[in-house]
Image: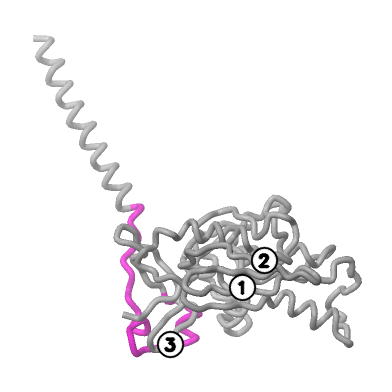
């Protein structure tokens, strides 16, 4: 008799436990499931997302390969194409360059980005993109011209080269040109570029009423951020050690000048966030 009671209790216990496990699993699935997106008409072919719509945030979902979908924000567009930035970092903590100076460009960040996105088979290789580093241009304009601007401390002249020359991506091949005096170095860093980093110029174009869009901070905790392609001349001690990043400072998006090596930035965690260009369909 006692054995029958125990068996009944055991069956009830197993049923209850199984029910709890099933409910927990369903709950986890629902919690982790993103809300369905409301597709904005401006992402359709023939339409254009306005500056105001982009500022408020136009989010789209892209099947980067046959198994994975990622969400992106529109940062620029025309009737046929749109340039998108992922809504989260693809890697949390990455150096811009590994040698404390910015005259070689963001090689570490771009190589890591190439590796992280190489499986994005549905995203075409970048066919034709070039960028002249405006960190270098700003230094030469403001510190090496005849008129010195008072907002920039141009007294540090030990290393005349600040920033890198630039980069180009042709049919997925990334070629970056360093800014080494009398001997510019040009290196092929990757042959599989499907995504790139955002530029400061692209970020500037997002400003409305002197405010950056709040969605630039998507999925970032305070003092987290992501690199741009642009070097910086705003470091206090040495103009060849900085690069610009988008960072979450006091819950507001900010363009920050940070050391190119993340280990030297106390309290900051800077990663990489992919930018892609796709056809409107």
Residue ID for mark 2: 105
Check disc 2: other Cα within 10 Å, few if <14, some if 14-19, many if 20+. Answer: many
Residue depicted at x 73% and y 66%: 103
Count the labels in the image: 3
**Tag 1, which secondary structure?**
strand
Q: Which quadrant of the structure image shows residue 150?
A: bottom right
**Tag 3, which secondary structure?**
loop
Q: Position of residue 50 (x, y in %)?
A: 45, 87
Q: Which quadrant of the structure image shows residue 213?
A: bottom right
Residue depicted at x 85% and y 67%: 159
Residue ID for mark 1: 167
Residue depicted at x 29% and y 42%: 24
**Overall secondary structure of the magenta stretch?**
loop
| Label 3 or label 1, whichever comes before in sequence order | 3
Point out the stretch of residues depicted in magenta.
Answer: 31-58
Does residue 265 appear to the left or right of 171 in the view shown? right
Does residue 96 appear to the left or right of 25 in the view shown? right
**Marks 1 and 2, Cα distance to the nearest angstrom?**
8 Å
Residue ID for mark 3: 78
Q: Does residue 202 appear in this view? A: yes
Which marked residue is nearer to the observer: mark 3 or mark 2?
Answer: 2
Q: Position of residue 113 (x, y in %)?
A: 52, 60
Check disc 3: other Cα within 10 Å, few if <14, some if 14-19, many if 20+. Answer: some
The answer to the question of whether label 1 and label 2 lie on touching residues, with beta carbons closer than 8 A, is yes
Q: Position of residue 186 (x, y in %)?
A: 66, 68
């Amino acid at each position: 008799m006692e054995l029958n009671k125990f068996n009944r209790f055991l069956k009830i216990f197993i049923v209850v436990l199984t029910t709890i496990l099933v409910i927990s699993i369903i709950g986890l699935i629902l919690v982790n499931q993103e809300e369905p997106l409301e597709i904005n008409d401006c992402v359709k072919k023939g339409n254009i997302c306005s500056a105001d719509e982009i500022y408020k945030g136009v989010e789209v979902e892209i099947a980067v390969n046959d198994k994975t979908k990622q969400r992106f924000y529109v940062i620029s567009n025309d009737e046929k194409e749109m340039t998108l930035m992922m809504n989260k970092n693809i890697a949390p903590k990455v150096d811009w360059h590994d040698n404390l100076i910015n005259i070689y460009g963001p090689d570490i960040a771009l190589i890591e980005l190439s590796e992280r996105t190489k499986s994005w088979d549905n995203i075409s290789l970048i066919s034709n993109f070039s960028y002249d580093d405006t960190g270098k241009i700003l230094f030469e304009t403001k510190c090496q011209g005849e008129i010195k601007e008072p907002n920039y401390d141009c007294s540090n002249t030990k290393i005349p080269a600040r920033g890198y020359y630039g980069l180009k991506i042709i049919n997925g091949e990334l070629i970056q040109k360093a800014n080494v005096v009398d001997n510019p170095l040009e290196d092929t860093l990757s042959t599989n570029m499907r995504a790139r980093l955002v530029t400061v110029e692209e970020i500037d174009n997002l400003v409305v009423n002197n405010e950056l869009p709040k969605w630039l901070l998507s999925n970032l905790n305070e003092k987290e951020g992501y690199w741009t392609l642009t070097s910086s001349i705003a470091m206090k001690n040495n103009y060849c050690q900085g690069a610009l990043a988008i960072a979450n400072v006091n819950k507001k998006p900010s363009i920050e000048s940070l050391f190119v090596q993340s280990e030297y930035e106390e309290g900051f965690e800077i990663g990489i966030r992919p930018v892609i260009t796709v056809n409107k369909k």
